[in-house]
Image: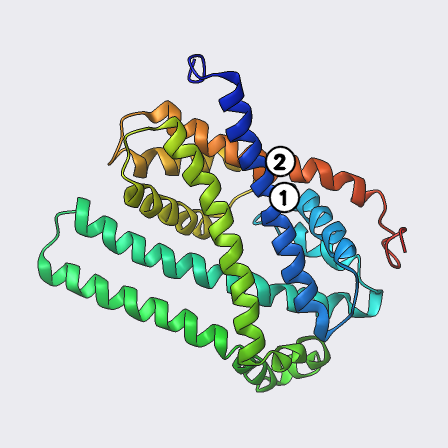
Amino acid sequence: MLLSNIPKVEIISIIGLVFLLMFVNWFLEAAKWKRLMLKIESFSFYRAIESVFCGLTLAIFTPNRLGEYGGRVFFLSPKRRIVGVVAMAVGNIGQLVLTNIFGAIALSLFIYRFIDLDYRLFFAIQILAVAFCLFFIVFYFNIQWLNGILLSFKFTRKYKKFYSILGRYRKGELFRILMFCLARYLVFSSQYFILFIWLVPGLHYADIVMMICILFFVQSTLPSLDLFDVGIRSVTASYFFSYITKQDVAVIACTASIWLINIIIPAILGTYFVFKLNFFGNSKSN
């Protein structure tokens, strides 16, 4: 057994810390969601927490977490729900920007360290990685361009009342949203980091950080269903970590533990808020 020789107090302390960080992670997401909705509808932080956990419950049953959008916006007044989906997409794009940037940097380091490539090919990959990162930064901080692009098409122009919210997010506001995204990224990275240094001793800290960034990046590009996502996460982690450790069981245990703590347990907690929903109005608590 992986934990058989570890004192119970230590196990409880480490798992408890990772569990606590799960709440920090989703409370930060609630704060980000509340900030995004300042342009649309004002509500309390507790209501933001309700909607986030409700979204997590519905997300595990839908491909690529699409149900999360529905779970959140049903806490809004009916006439603002579609606009709420667009606002939530802004926050998700911010999270994706960081995942892709850190992932591209980590993959570049991974290739440099472990893949034997011709220097010209390696240089070309670095140029592509830089261009990739710049694209996401420029696109995110000019997200109102998307509003202009959609307005240029006749068939999308009639829906402008739903996506015109994109034009309200200025660079300063987008930067503040991105800081929430960065805080979340650091928190769930810390969860992985804590478990890996605990269960897979002897790894260099820089290697763990590199692999964690790659895992997030790869997972964000793969189609998945949260309920069965543990298999994809475990295979991905097992493959990349095989370059720095042979403790495959410990790597899979770390990955599965994060899946359970960050996805499944919050989804179970969120069922309480799902039952409070009134799908044709606001939540029953209101």
Look at 58% across and 75% down and name the residue there. Answer: 173
Mark in the foreground, 1 or 2: 1
Left or right position of 278 against 259: right
Q: Is residue 188 above or below residue 87?
A: above
The quadrant where residue 90 appears: bottom right
Q: Give the position of the N terminus as an image quadrant.
A: top left
User: Which of these two is toward me, 123 or 149?
Assistant: 123
Where residue 60 appears, x then y in whole percent?
63, 41
Where residue 20 appears, x then y in whole percent?
60, 39
Look at 44% across and 52% down and name the residue there. Answer: 221
Residue 80 visible to an observer of this rendering:
yes
Q: Earlier in the sequence, mark 1 or mark 2?
A: 1
Q: Is residue 162 above or below residue 35?
A: below
- Tag shown at residue 264: 2
User: Which of these two is toward me, 57 or 6?
Assistant: 6
User: Which of these two is toward me, 231 or 260?
Assistant: 260
- Tag shown at residue 219: none
Look at 65% across and 41% down and name the residue there. Answer: 61
Q: Is residue 253 above or below residue 237?
A: above
Kind of residue at disc 1: Phe
Dot 2 crowding, Cα within 10 Å, few <14, some 14–19, many 20+:
some
Q: Secondary structure at mark 2?
A: helix
User: Which of these two is toward me, 229 or 185?
Assistant: 185
Dot 1 crowding, Cα within 10 Å, few <14, some 14–19, many 20+:
some
Query: Which residue reaches farthest front?
Result: 9
Kind of residue at disc 2: Ile
- Tag shown at residue 23: 1
